[in-house]
Amino acid sequence: EAGVAQSPRYKIIEKRQSVAFWCNPISGHATLYWYQQILGQGPKLLIQFQNNGVVDDSQLPKDRFSAERLKGVDSTLKIQPAKLEDSAVYLCASSPQGSGNTIYFGEGSWLTVV
Amino acid sequence: QKEVEQNSGPLSVPEGAIASLNCTYSDRGSQSFFWYRQYSGKSPELIMFIYSNGDKEDGRFTAQLNKASQYVSLLIRDSQPSDSATYLCAVTRGSNYKLTFGKGTLLTVNP
């Protein structure tokens, strides 16, 4: 079974530029999560989708971050404009519907803002 | 008060010893509790989850939950150098399975 796929794995951009990350969850997984993990901290949930609907985006900085999951499968997270403090690993995760104990993480997309 | 608190460490134990990792949480409505292991530069991987008060054992790992004290721990018996990693405690509340993580504890097992 293929895991959660993310791209790009690494990205370096200048502040005020934009960047987009893509995630393809495990086939059949209804729930998709985007987490932000800053160095030395635990992951923080940015947004959670159930199929193509948003369940929780309370910690998403909506003035600069946006995410979509148009067809209920893959998802894109965009940052525009980027700030230095956005330097982090962006982790995508997925789980089957109604299964909180089987959340699978992708390898992450590492962002450095200079 | 942070929602999930862990001692950031580092915690250093000799090979073969028992490593004890601790976590406290602030939300009494938390229902499910998870321990993830994260190697440097890698994504978190689930080790164990526990829902009920008491102990849950899986191989060399034992999770302990005390809801009255809002405390969850992870014991690693016969620690191996390959156990050296950051251990993340996470909790969920409600049916949306939103994981709230602590900062993690760095464990180093010395040969």
Image: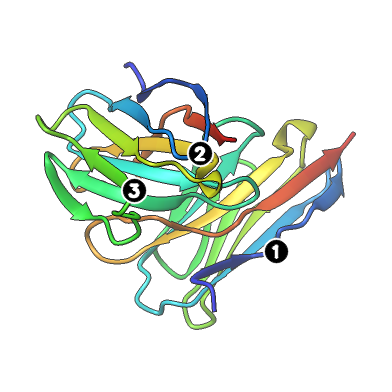
Q: Chain of mark 1?
A: B
Most extreme residue toward the bottom is: B68
Is A44 above or below relative to B83? below
Percent position of residue B49, x then y = 45, 52
Q: Residues within 10 Å of mark 1 (few under 14, many from 20)?
A: some
Q: How crowded is the residue under tag 2: few (<14 C-alpha within 10 Å), some, or many (20+)?
A: some
Residue at 32% x, 56% y: name it: B98
Q: CA distance from mark 3 to mark 2?
A: 12 Å
For disc 2, the marked residue is A15
Query: If the image is split into quadrants, where does the N terminus of chain A sit?
Result: top left
Q: Identify the subunit bearing mark 2.
A: A
Horizontal relation, residue A48 to residue B47: left or right: left
Identify the residue position indicated by label 3 in the image.
A64
State the residue lying farthest toward the top.
Answer: A2
Question: Which residue matches tag 1?
Answer: B7
Image marks 1 and 2: residues in contact by CB distance under 8 Å: no
Q: Looking at the image, which is closer to me, A71 or B35?
A: A71
> What is the CA distance from the residue labelled 3 to the residue labelled 1?
32 Å
Q: What element does badge 1 sit on?
A: loop
Identify which residue is drawn at 77% across, 57% down: B9
Q: Please rate how many residues cluster around mark 3, counting C-alpha atoms within 10 Å: few if below 14, some from 14 to 19, many from 20.
A: few
**Relative to B51, does residue A114 appear above or below in the rendering?**
above
Mark 3 vs 2: CB contact within 8 A = no
| Residue B45 in view here | no
What amino acid does circle 3 point to? Arg
